[in-house]
Image (tube, rainbow, N blue to C red):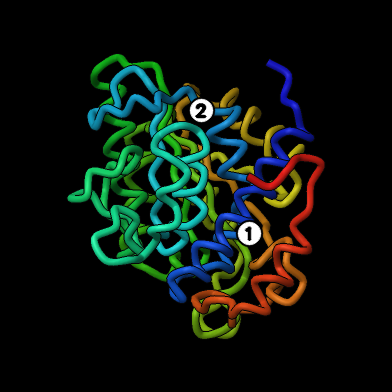
Amino acid sequence: MIPDIEKLTNIAIQVRRDIVRMVHGSQSGHPGGSLGCADYFVALYFHIMRHNPDFQLDGKNEDLFFLSNGHISPVWYSVLARSGYFKVEELSTFRKLNSRLQGHPTTHEHLPGIRIASGSLGQGLSVAIGAAQTKKLNADPNLVYSLHGDGELQEGQIWEAAIYAPYNKIDNLISTIDVNGQQIDGSTENVLSLGNLQNKWEAFGWEVLEMNGNDMQDVIRTLELAKSKTGKGKPIMILMQTVMGNGIDFMMHSHKWHGIAPNDEQLKAALLQLTSTEEDY
């Protein structure tokens, strides 16, 4: 199926509107990374993945997605709602008392689309590998996708998982790292440099691709390429270059927007920048 890039881009703009409204509404949350990853999530849920909004926890006979850097829950909740998992109106309950939309995704609220609690960083790759290995054992031909933050790579469990997947030929897994160069305390380079990520993942035995995560056409192209490389003995790792706060000029490139909410004036200014050829809804 040929992707409608304009339509997907417009959905991503709507998702960015959702993000800033959600975080503003609760005066709590993580807008920066969420805004940077909107194009990736829209591409995944509206074009790439075979998934079913009639949610079943076991995920049989469909592609699965796991969010490891769970603090960027606003972008995931928006995309889940807008792809049919629950009503869009529920987004207004984000981080509020008794809401199913917690700051980090959890499972005891039984929110459709969520299979693991995440946000305790470093764990999602292990879970994704386990799910992918289960699909292989069950002769399920569908794929597993996961997303990770670059700062998250400072966690040791990531590298244990990195060893395990190639050794066990987990070749039905497409993982992505959001390489925005920012984390809560500053730039990743200044906090704890990650070095050459391509060389690292290739040395562990992964097939490594790169993409511009804020260019919808390149996101689609690279994810399709990644799918074509599955089943060939290696897990896939995509290094996704993004800009934290993408789409809102006063949030872009700054770690300060990792985890703070816009005030009323900032929300108004942000929404004025998030314009598209489709009506805000």
Residue at coordinates 60% horizontally, 40% vertically from top-left?
Answer: 42
Residue at coordinates 56% horizontally, 63% vertically from top-left?
Answer: 21
The N terminus lies in quadrant: top right
Direction from residue 274 to residue 185 in the image, left or right: left
Residue 12 seen anywhere in this rendered image of the structure: yes
The type of residue carrying mark 1 is: Gly
Q: Secondary structure at mark 2?
A: loop
Residue at coordinates 39% horizontally, 50% vertically from top-left?
Answer: 162
Q: Position of residue 72 (x, y in %)?
A: 47, 60
The type of residue carrying mark 2 is: Met
**Where is mark 2, residue-wise?**
49
Instruction: Give the total of numbered labels.
Output: 2
Q: Earlier in the sequence, mark 1 or mark 2?
A: 1
Q: Position of residue 271 (x, y in %)?
A: 71, 63
**Where is mark 1, residue-wise?**
36
Q: Secondary structure at mark 1?
A: helix
